[in-house]
Image (spheres, rainbow, N blue to C red):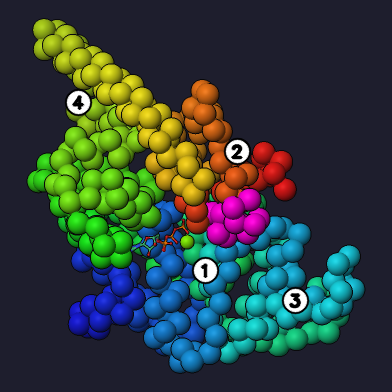
């Protein structure tokens, strides 16, 4: 794939970065775009998967037709068939008129099925049919309809596992993933991290007319060594907080550490893992290593305590009506359950997130207030709280806030 075409596509969509794996992913998207195959985009949460269906649509012959993005994880199971395929009048209680689904709406265009692994099995069966024959039935109808749609799907879960566990149809998986595009995690993109940080910092100050932040060399190193479990979304969030609270400053490694709430926790396993375990044969040396590690752990714990106190103060200061409480602790809250499971060591226990301060506002309360402020609109609420709609949906259920 022609390198300049890849760079042009990146510029057109606002994709920052030159890491070979990212460039390769963009190249693959451009190559498959004009060929009407289904594509599955894989990658961790926040890695930037949403650019890829957009590239595929814009560089295909369908570019003048509709592009519809559907977040399968955010639509309740009971209504997803009707959202996707439409329904007839009277198909279920409340179906006062018939409605077109996205597959009819986007006829001739592209549908992006985000978080496709969340589709219920019944919907998977309908989707397989429409992919194989272009045919579908509206909910409550027996009249077969035709549509001409290209599907690009995305997921941040291990699809092979979902198939093995019977949560995802194998035939549909093969059908969807004729071509796979893997979006690399941010931590593997080296210097792109610094590039993105600079870009997010300058975008923020331009938009809000604040003096721009810069980074010390140590801060840059720290940015690049950090694991970024929430990928680019998390980086953007951290940079924007610093751009606000440290406007005009040069960010040092110490300042940065204050904005990586789980930094201390994530450093612990790193310490344990990245250095060879002390060997039993050279006793003296091994005692020495233990001691140093213990010292480091103690200082980390002290630092964590300081950070928690600082957070408490920040929370108190931020408790104005229009301020999103969660902005200061974003990465903990917006974490899909799958990620939570696999990288538990980096996430503070859930309990911490539901009671943010002893005497202060709880997560439940924060969600309730934000829902109120946004007149119950979940998308706006999720955006304000800086969590995904799916997480919000789950939490609303969990706390009985419906
Ligand atoms: N290379 C990049 N350059 C600029 N912005 C990026 C880049 N990658 C991601 N972003 C930004 O990061 C945010 C998260 O990206 P996106 O929504 O595509 O993530 P995702 O992979 O779809 O995550 P999820 O699985 O949680 O839906 C978006 O605001 C996006 O614009
Ligand atoms: Mg997404």
**How dense is the environment of label 3, judged by Cα within 10 Å: few (below 14), some, or many (20 and up)?**
many
Residue 86, label in figure: 3
Nearer to us of marks 2 and 4 is 2
Vertical placement of residue 266 versus 330, above or below? above
Q: Are marks 3 and 2 in contact (CB under 8 Å)?
A: no
Q: Are marks 1 and 2 in contact (CB under 8 Å)?
A: no
User: Who's the residue at 56% across and 41% down the image?
Assistant: 366
How far across and down, in percent of the image, does residue 100 sit?
A: 73, 81
The disc, 4 or 3, on the residue closer to the chain's N-terminal end is 3
Residue 388, label in figure: none
The disc, 1 or 3, on the residue closer to the chain's N-terminal end is 3
Look at mark 4 in the image and give the residue it sits on. Answer: 276
Whether the residue carrying mark 1 lies under 8 Å from ligand 2 is answered with no
The answer to if 57 sits in the magenta stretch is no
Distance in Å between CA atoms under marks 1 and 3: 20 Å
Distance in Å between CA atoms under marks 3 and 2: 36 Å
Look at mark 1 in the image and give the residue it sits on. Answer: 153
Please indicate, yes or no, whether residue 339 appears anywhere in the rendered image. no
- Callout 1: helix, strand or loop? strand
* Residue 240 appears left or right of 400: left
């Amino acid at each position: 794939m022609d390198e300049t075409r890849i760079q042009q596509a990146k510029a057109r969509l606002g994709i920052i970065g030159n890491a070979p794996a990212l460039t390769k992913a963009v190249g693959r998207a451009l190559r498959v775009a004009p060929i009407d195959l289904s594509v599955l985009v894989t990658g961790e949460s926040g890695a930037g998967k949403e650019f890829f269906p957009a590239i595929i649509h814009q560089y295909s012959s369908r570019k003048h037709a509709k592009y519809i993005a559907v977040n399968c994880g955010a639509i309740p199971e009971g209504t997803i068939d009707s959202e996707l395929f439409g329904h007839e009048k009277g198909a279920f209680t409340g179906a006062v008129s018939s409605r077109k689904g996205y597959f009819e709406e986007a006829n001739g265009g592209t549908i992006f099925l985000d978080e496709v692994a969340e589709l219920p099995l019944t919907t998977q069966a309908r989707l397989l049919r429409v992919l194989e024959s272009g045919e579908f039935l509206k909910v409550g109808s027996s009249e077969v309809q035709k549509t001409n749609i290209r599907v690009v799907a995305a997921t941040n879960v291990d699809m092979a596992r979902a198939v093995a566990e019977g949560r995802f149809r194998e035939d549909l998986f093969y059908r969807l993933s004729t071509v796979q595009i893997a979006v690399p995690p941010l931590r593997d993109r080296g210097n792109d991290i610094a590039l993105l940080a600079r870009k997010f910092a300058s975008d923020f100050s331009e938009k809000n007319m604040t003096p721009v932040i810069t980074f010390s060399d140590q801060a840059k190193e720290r940015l690049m060594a950090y694991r970024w479990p929430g990928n680019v979304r998390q980086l953007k969030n951290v940079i924007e907080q610093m751009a606000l609270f440290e406007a005009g400053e040069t960010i040092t490694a110490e300042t940065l550490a204050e904005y990586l709430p789980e930094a201390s926790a994530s450093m612990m396993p790193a310490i344990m893992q990245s250095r060879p375990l002390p060997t039993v044969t050279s006793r003296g040396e091994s005692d020495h290593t233990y001691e140093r590690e213990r010292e480091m752990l103690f200082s980390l714990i002290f630092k964590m305590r300081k950070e928690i106190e600082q957070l408490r103060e920040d929370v108190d200061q931020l408790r104005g009506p229009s301020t999103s409480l969660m902005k200061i602790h974003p990465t903990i809250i917006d974490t899909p359950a799958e990620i939570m499971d696999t990288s538990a060591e980096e996430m503070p226990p859930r309990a911490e997130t539901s009671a943010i301060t002893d005497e202060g506002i709880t997560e439940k309360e924060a969600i309730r207030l934000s829902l109120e402020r946004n007149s119950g609109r979940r998308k706006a609420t999720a955006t304000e709280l800086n969590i995904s709609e799916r997480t919000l949906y789950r939490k609303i259920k969990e706390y009985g806030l419906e």
